[in-house]
């Protein structure tokens, strides 16, 4: 009997005994193999564990049973082998997104029986080739190794660094695949559901479970960056269809409830989004579900390796102070840096700041000379960086003739994501001390040392940088524009 027949027979056995107590040994016997080998084969082919499959099928059927007149929750719970009504209700709510008492036709999340036949064998080969491009970890098989906790943690950090190199391009390939109409004909829909829902989303969920357990095991040593658990929580929400993005909530719910909606090109465009490149910095017309997954995957990895990166980047200087600030509404007043206004000279800057000095009644409380930088809410690939010398003043401050201004609000002022002004008056503030040339060094950095370190601390904390729609930074001159800058502001959303 070949592996297709073995798996098919075992799946049918599961389907026939969903209301019975069944063990992995009973199921693997149908495939004439050991339970350990069967579980490995099942996971490799379907991207989920046997237990997950049984749970998903039971909860699907339980929802339909609850729709029957006179149906009682406790009876359905017992039928599908739950020990208590409470445990059933919790599992049901996690799976469907609502409690058993609120089940309604058309709202049920359906997990269909898995099927294999020769006609989709090639599809499975393709899907595994596609899925295996992601840089998966192997922590489950390494958890019990006799290594010091610090070495175990460094192994996780090394994996995170490699995953950050590999995964962005694979997510972009996933976007391309979802947008390729030739891949979404009716005869490929069931196969594609296996690829996306089980092969990718379920496998990421399994990886997160393993990573969380691995990190929890070494957490008492005090070396684990606690922000990683928040990042994993957010990623798990996305992978389970509980998206944090309001604009995506409806379309994601539709896909998880009834995968056949993916026949619709417009639905797939919202799921796929746009390619953002290996650094995630390209501009996209549509921010889709795949973009959300890509961002969450990155956040997990950043929380793991950024703290170490920050330490390595401080060569000859150090971070003296770092804090997050929520300011009231502000107005930045200044001029764009350019030779024509003499702002490339000390004399030109002296003239600019002498005018701002006369406006002391409008001081904001954050009264440093700064060089504000932003891209007008667009990606760095679509809009060059604009630099403006000036100061943050109170909201509504009169603007001197020849100056420009940008308003900042305490939080977003629109329901949906709108790129550009007004920006948000929330930011990280980092103060540096030490070798001036070292902290301004740009060689080997994305921008310069202060910019990179400030950003990387934020990423390590799993704090949101609102790129590109509300992204801005500012080089800060605590001792005035005619001295070195020794601090940095970086837009965040707290």
Image (cartoon, rainbow, N blue to C red):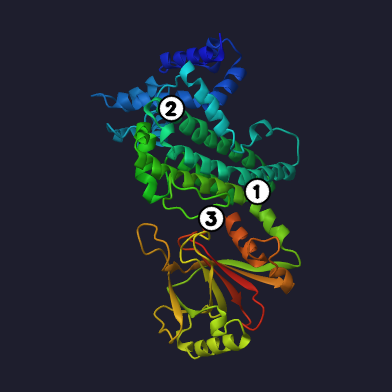
- Which label sits on residue 56? 2
Q: Position of residue 474 (x, y in %)?
A: 56, 71
Q: Position of residue 243 (x, y in %)?
A: 42, 45
Q: Position of residue 213 (x, y in %)?
A: 60, 38
Separation of residues labelled 2 and 1 (CA atoms): 33 Å
Classify mark 2: residues with Cα within 10 Å, few (<14), some (14-19) or many (20+): many
Classify mark 1: residues with Cα within 10 Å, few (<14), some (14-19) or many (20+): some
- Which label sits on residue 224? 1
Quadrant of the rendering where the N terminus is positioned: top right
Q: Earlier in the sequence, mark 2 or mark 1?
A: 2
Q: Nearer the viewer, mark 3 or mark 1?
A: 3
Classify mark 3: residues with Cα within 10 Å, few (<14), some (14-19) or many (20+): some
Separation of residues labelled 2 and 3 (CA atoms): 37 Å
Locate residue 41: give its quadrant. top right
Locate residue 407: give its quadrant. bottom left
The residue pinned by badge 3 equals 281
Q: Is residue 116 visible?
A: no
Q: Is residue 117 left or right of residue 208?
A: left
């Amino acid at each position: 009997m070949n592996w297709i027949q073995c798996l098919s027979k075992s799946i049918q056995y599961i389907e026939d005994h969903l209301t019975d107590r069944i063990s992995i040994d009973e199921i693997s016997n149908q495939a004439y193999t050991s339970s350990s080998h069967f579980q490995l084969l099942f996971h490799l082919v379907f991207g989920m564990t046997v237990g997950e499959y049984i749970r998903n099928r039971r909860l699907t059927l339980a929802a339909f049973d609850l729709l029957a007149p006179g149906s009682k929750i406790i009876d359905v719970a017992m039928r599908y082998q739950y020990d208590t009504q409470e445990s059933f209700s919790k599992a049901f709510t996690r799976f469907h997104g609502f409690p058993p008492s609120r089940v309604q036709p058309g709202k049920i999340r359906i997990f269909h029986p898995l099927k294999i036949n020769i006609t989709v064998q090639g599809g499975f080969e393709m899907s595994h080739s596609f899925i295996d491009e992601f840089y998966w970890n192997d922590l489950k098989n390494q958890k019990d190794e006799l290594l010091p906790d610090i070495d175990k943690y460094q192994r996780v950090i090394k994996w995170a660094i490699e995953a950050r190199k590999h995964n962005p391009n694979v997510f972009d390939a996933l976007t391309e695949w979802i947008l390729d109409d030739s891949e979404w004909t009716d005869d490929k829909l069931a196969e594609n559901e296996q690829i996306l829902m089980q092969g990718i989303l379920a496998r990421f969920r399994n990886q997160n479970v393993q990573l969380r357990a691995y990190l929890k095991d070494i957490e008492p040593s005090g070396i684990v960056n606690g922000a990683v658990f928040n990042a994993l929580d957010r990623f798990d929400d996305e992978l389970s269809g509980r998206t944090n993005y309001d604009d995506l909530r409806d379309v994601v719910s539709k896909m998880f409830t009834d995968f056949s909606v993916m026949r619709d090109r417009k639905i797939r465009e919202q799921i796929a989004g746009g390619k953002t490149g290996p650094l995630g910095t390209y501009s996209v017309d549509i921010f889709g579900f795949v973009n959300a997954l890509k961002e969450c995957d990155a956040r997990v990895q950043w929380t793991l390796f950024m703290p170490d990166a920050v330490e390595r980047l401080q060569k000859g200087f150090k971070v003296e102070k770092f804090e997050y600030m929520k300011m009231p509404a502000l107005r930045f007043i200044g001029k764009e840096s350019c030779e024509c206004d003499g702002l490339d000279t000390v004399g030109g800057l002296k003239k600019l700041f002498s005018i701002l000095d006369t406006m002391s009644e409008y001081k904001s409380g954050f009264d440093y000379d700064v060089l504000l930088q932003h891209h007008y809410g667009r990606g760095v690939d679509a809009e060059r960086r604009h630099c403006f010398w000036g100061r943050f003043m109170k909201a509504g401050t009169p603007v001197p003739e020849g100056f420009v201004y940008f308003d900042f609000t305490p939080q977003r002022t629109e329901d949906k994501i709108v790129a550009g002004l007004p920006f948000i008056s929330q930011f990280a503030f980092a103060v540096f001390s030490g070798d001036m040339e070292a902290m301004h060094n740009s060689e080997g950095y994305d921008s310069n040392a202060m910019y990179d370190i400030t950003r990387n601390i934020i990423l390590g904390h799993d704090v949101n940088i609102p790129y590109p729609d509300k992204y801005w930074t500012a080089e800060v001159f605590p001792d005035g524009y005619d001295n070195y800058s020794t601090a940095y502001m970086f837009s965040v959303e707290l």
